[in-house]
Image (cartoon, rainbow, N blue to C red):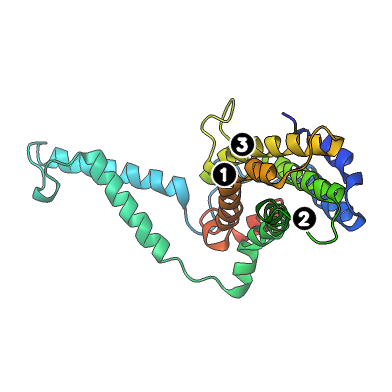
């Protein structure tokens, strides 16, 4: 890969390219995440359950066991010779799965509304993530506007424009490295939306697959901008557009979907308020 995925070296090697205020911002974020993961890891034992009720996969598993036991008892009582008219032709497993799904849907609808204070706790990660994503959207729009209009922003030199594109790619690489190294593995302990997968990403959740697709496009854009910076190629806006449009949809989908997944209404399904305060971000 053209983009290095080794986080500490990348942070150190790219910070000097940034304006001072951005150096401070990104260095603080990167190393705060590293220190938080090293000194205050979230412990989520496999046997742990929320303080009040069992939820998520554990509750679903208990319902399936109860349903199976109920079906077995009913079959034994009737001599396993008859089926209820309403369930005729339906496998016990299908009936149990349908009952479990309906029960879970009803329980989700019954969740009490969050107070303002509770919402802030549960929405904390989404707010922080959206702050970073807003920066990526702004950088993308600057490049895309020039690529589609054929004109650089007023007052911006060609070299500055090229460096803006390279910095955008460097920021995004650091951002994804922090997520995949220190944030997603912790969230994946309870949330299938952040499952990392095995081997070469096999079985990874959609958000992780999106990362891979985004980085394929980033490599193409970086290679072109590096050629333009070195003088091997002239920067042409129509060519820049072709290097961006192939991964535009997956990038913007990812920026929105990741924030929504970290939103309060989804996070409350998996974590207690105390756990939310300890999650790394």
Sequence-first tag of 1 and 2? 2
Q: Look at the numbered discs 3 and 1 and tell me whether their residues touch, using CB distance below 8 Å.
A: no
For residue 145, say whether it is visible: yes
For residue 35, say whether it is visible: no
Which mark is in front, 3 or 1? Answer: 3
Sequence-first tag of 3 and 1? 1
Q: Is 128 in front, or is 192?
A: 128
Query: At 35% from the left edge and 61% from the top edge, which residue is drawn?
Result: 106
User: Residue pushed farthest bottom?
Assistant: 116
Q: Is 271 in front, or is 131?
A: 131
| Mark 1 residue element | helix
Left or right, 167 with reference to 213: right
25 vs 187: above or below: below
- The residue that mark 3 highlights is 212
Q: Position of residue 144 (x, y in %)?
A: 67, 53
Query: At 77% from the left edge and 32% from the top edge, which residue is drawn?
Result: 4
- The residue that mark 2 highlights is 152
Give me the disc on residue 160.
none
Which mark is in front, 1 or 2? Answer: 2
Q: Look at the numbered discs 1 and 2 and tell me whether their residues touch, using CB distance below 8 Å.
A: no
- The residue that mark 1 highlights is 207
Left or right, 48 with reference to 15: left
Q: Position of residue 214 (x, y in %)?
A: 63, 41
Whole-number angstrom distance, CA of label 3 to CA of label 1: 9 Å
| Mark 3 residue element | helix
209 vs 99: above or below: above
Sequence-first tag of 3 and 2? 2
């Amino acid at each position: 890969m053209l983009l290095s995925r080794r986080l500490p070296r990348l942070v150190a090697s790219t910070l000097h390219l940034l304006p001072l205020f951005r150096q401070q911002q990104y260095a603080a974020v990167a190393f705060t995440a590293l220190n938080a993961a090293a000194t205050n890891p979230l412990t989520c034992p496999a046997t742990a359950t929320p303080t009040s009720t069992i939820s998520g996969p554990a509750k679903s598993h208990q319902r399936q066991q109860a349903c199976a036991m109920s079906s077995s008892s009913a079959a034994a009582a009737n001599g396993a010779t008859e089926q209820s008219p309403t369930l005729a032709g339906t496998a016990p497993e299908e009936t149990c799965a349908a009952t479990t799904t309906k029960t879970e849907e009803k329980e989700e609808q019954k969740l009490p509304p969050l107070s303002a204070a509770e919402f802030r706790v549960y929405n904390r990660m989404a707010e922080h993530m959206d702050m970073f994503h807003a920066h990526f959207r702004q950088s993308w729009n600057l490049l895309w506007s020039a690529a589609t209009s054929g004109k650089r922003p007023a007052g911006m030199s060609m070299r500055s424009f090229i460096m803006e594109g390279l910095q955008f790619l460097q920021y995004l690489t650091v951002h994804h490295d922090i997520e995949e190294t220190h944030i997603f593995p912790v969230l994946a302990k309870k949330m299938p939306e952040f499952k990392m997968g095995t081997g070469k990403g096999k079985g990874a959740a959609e958000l992780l697959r999106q990362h891979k697709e985004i980085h394929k496009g980033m490599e193409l854009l970086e290679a072109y901008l590096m050629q333009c910076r070195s003088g091997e190629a002239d920067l042409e806006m129509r060519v820049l557009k072709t290097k961006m449009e192939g991964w535009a949809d997956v990038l913007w989908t990812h920026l929105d979907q990741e924030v929504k997944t970290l939103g309060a209404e989804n996070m409350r399904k998996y974590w207690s308020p105390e756990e939310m305060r300890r999650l790394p971000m």
